[in-house]
Image (cartoon, helix red, strand yellow):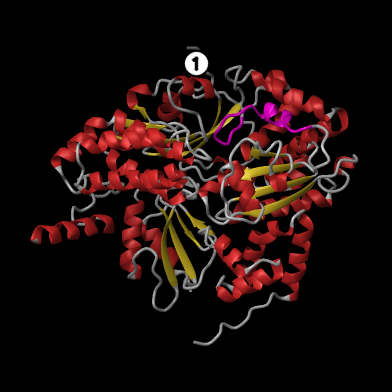
Amino acid sequence: MASVDYKNFEKVLLKHVDHPDSRKLDFYLSHEGYSGARKALTELQPAEIIDLVKASNLRGRGGAGFPCGLKWSFVPESTPKPKYLVVNADESEPGTFKDRILLERDPHQIIEGILIAAYAIQAHSVYCYIRGEFAKGYTVMEEAIAEAYSKGLLGDNVLGTDFRCDLTMHRGAGAYICGEETGLLSSLEGKRGLPKIKPPFPAVEGLFGCPTVVNNVETLANLPHILTRGVEWFQSIGPEKGPGPKLLCVSGHVERPGTYEVPLGINLNDLIFDLAGGVWKGRTLKCVIPGGSSAKVLTAAECHVPMDFDSLMAKGTMLGSGGVIVMDDTTDMVDALYNLLRFYHHESCGQCTPCREGTGWLEKIVGRIRAGHGRMEDLDLCLEICEMMCGKTICVLADAAAFPCESIIKKFRREFEERIQSGSGHSRRIFPSPGGPLVQIGAISAHNQEEREARKQSAKH
Amino acid sequence: MTSPKPREFSPESQKRIEWLFTRYAVKEAALLPVLRLAEEEFGVIDNAAVACVAKVMGLSPSNVYGVLTFYTHYRRDGDGKYVVQVCSTLSCALRGCRDIVHHLEQRLGLKPGETTADGKFTLKKVECLASCDTAPVVQINADYHESLTTEKLDAILDGLR
């Protein structure tokens, strides 16, 4: 496959983030800021913008990779109901931290993207739902919004046109499920963040029952550049069916964890071994999560793959949120899986039995294996539970939990079997302290301690 | 048992709430922002705060309580002055968050979920804080503390009055 020139790639989304004034409106304006929105609002019709974004093949950067322009086109053009644009700034997919950089360091880029999207779907009220933990991002955005209002970039007559656009920041309060678009809308309505069944899709019946588009922060940040530099430019970056600059987050066992802006299509090996400095401490690669914790894992041998939507789908996984988590050869895969299953069980909203119970059983069973009480039948039992969880719930959290569980057990089955056979209560290599000695055998978690007490008690009788 | 002292929003907060009501077509949507306001003004969302919020929102206290308890990030009764939230999801676990938790357990004499007797610190294990490249990470109240070592963490805690 043709290699992608990522080394000479000029930053688009992260161009200004290292400048001390990157949050200021003056700085943004002096760097062609809001010229994309100006072009959209003063030269183009909403339908033309939708066609433009459709033609660009911009795909959602939140995790689903759904074509942005196509989603916009589902909003009924004429309806008596008000239309809403909602910005999904609830970044909570483990391994993902790209939206936070955009929110904290280039808020006006996001606001400009919001204007373009709002105008395209004719939404006059926009809410930016930001996760509660992003206190800093919230403050930065509030300041930028105040600046925008003061300069007529938001409000009744945006950029001197008769387009009204009001933007309100809305803080979440700790709930992964509020990153799911219908869970987000429930939370935005002032309720528990419970997802709703689709159809009806938010574009038809969303916030307050009105046509609503929910877009990810990074997706919106692309819009000013598509407007100013054109569809052809955007399509020249990466594969035609899903092009553009992409923020990829690398974390875990690498020398240089961080957010990297690259052309879509960069080889995963190049990302890990060149840009991120390779596996740390001279160790060997064992496993990689390519797109946030809900993406199926890749073994080290499977990492020669272009990082783009369709290539990763063809490989049986997904680009997802672009959160790349790297694990070296000292990683205990049973422990790693348990960590993720605990996460999903905790974050399940509880509405659907396959998810509420399924995530709980997976956590328990893998927890048992981790504590030394696994049975050989447990592995197929987990796989069966995963199958019963997929495609049977209101939202895809159940699938998101099943994907890593199924792929880790399948691809590292031998390790799980050896663990069960040895009956060891804990790995000798529980996430070794970086740079320090291995965690002492005696320092086991409370969970393990409970199990050991229970075993002692039952052994007595 | 004495009744909790009834809580009331200050005039500034009331103004802010009035403004919030103008931002949403349906008043109920202002609930999460109003809960944040209560957290800011009262320092905690206890039963009295819930009653106050319910009154202002025109909702039942049980409705407000049901919404409040769905979320993990509001300050609740029993939380210490500093809520030390240690990210414990995969990327941080791969880079030593367990050591951070153990260190805090020893230094504060707490298990996760507990608060010191003097009410100064609460220790919590939380899920991904979206700062995986600077793992291990701790959020203390609203502030992120990144690329932590036990030494750095000690220095941070020493500085908290």
Indicate the position of residue A436 as horizontal and vertical percent values.
Answer: 26, 49
Residue drawn at 52 percent across, 21 percent down: A310
- When the figure is inspected, residue A456 is found, relative to residue B134, above or below; the finding is below
Q: Quadrant of residue B33?
A: bottom right
Which residue is tagged 1? A3
Query: Is residue A279 in view?
Result: no
Q: Is residue A75 above or below residue B134?
A: above
Q: Quadrant of the C terminus of chain A?
A: bottom left
Residue A224 in the image, given as x and y percentages of width and height: 73, 33
Q: Residue at horizontal 58%, vertical 40%? A: A197
Residue A354, percent across and down?
43, 42
Q: Is residue A83 visible?
A: yes
| Magenta segment includes A423 | no
User: Can residue A73 be found in the magenta stretch?
Assistant: yes
Image side of residue A98 versus residue A289, left or right? right
- Residue sitting at the far top: A1
- Which three-letter amino acid code belongs to the residue tagged 1? Ser
